[in-house]
Amino acid sequence: MNESDLAPYVKTALALQGFGDLPAGAVDDITVQFARIHAIAAAFAELELPPELESAAVFRP
């Protein structure tokens, strides 16, 4: 996902949160940050964790 894919999402999210009147430069900066966050998260999303590292509780009666 690149910045041009994120731009409509960022603009819509800002408008829904009441930040629709930000200057274009600020929206561009936010879009760049979202792209950076996405790139970082994507690097970890593909990793498979071994079951012993899962933090979810395991039900045992």
Image: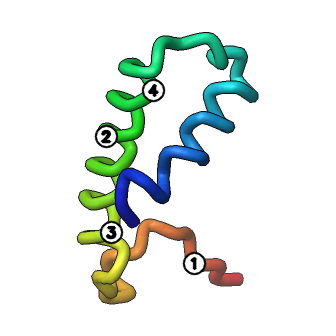
Question: Can you tell which quarter of the image residue 40 is in?
Answer: bottom left
Name the residue located 40 percent from the left edge and 75 percent from the top edge.
54
Distance (Cα) linking label 3 and label 2: 15 Å
Q: Nearer the viewer, residue 25 or 32?
A: 25
Circle 1 or circle 2, nearest the eye:
2
Residue tagged by mark 3? 42
Disc 4 residue type (three-letter): Val
Q: Characterize the local packing of mark 2: few (<14), some (14-19) or many (20 or more) Cα atoms within 10 angstroms.
A: some
Name the residue located 55 percent from the left edge and 70 percent from the top edge.
57
Q: Secondary structure at mark 1?
A: loop
Q: Are marks 1 and 4 in contact (CB under 8 Å)?
A: no
Residue tagged by mark 2? 32
Disc 2 residue type (three-letter): Val
Q: Is residue 52 left or right of residue 19?
A: left
Q: Secondary structure at mark 4?
A: helix
Circle 1 or circle 3, nearest the eye:
3
Distance (Cα) linking label 1 and label 2: 39 Å
Q: Is residue 30 left or right of residue 36?
A: right
Query: Sequence order check: which comes first, mark 3 or mark 2?
Result: 2
Q: Is residue 39 left or right of residue 21?
A: left
Name the residue located 48 percent from the left edge and 51 percent from the top edge.
6
Residue tagged by mark 1? 58
Name the residue located 32 percent from the left edge and 38 percent from the top edge.
33
Q: Which mark is residue 27?
A: 4
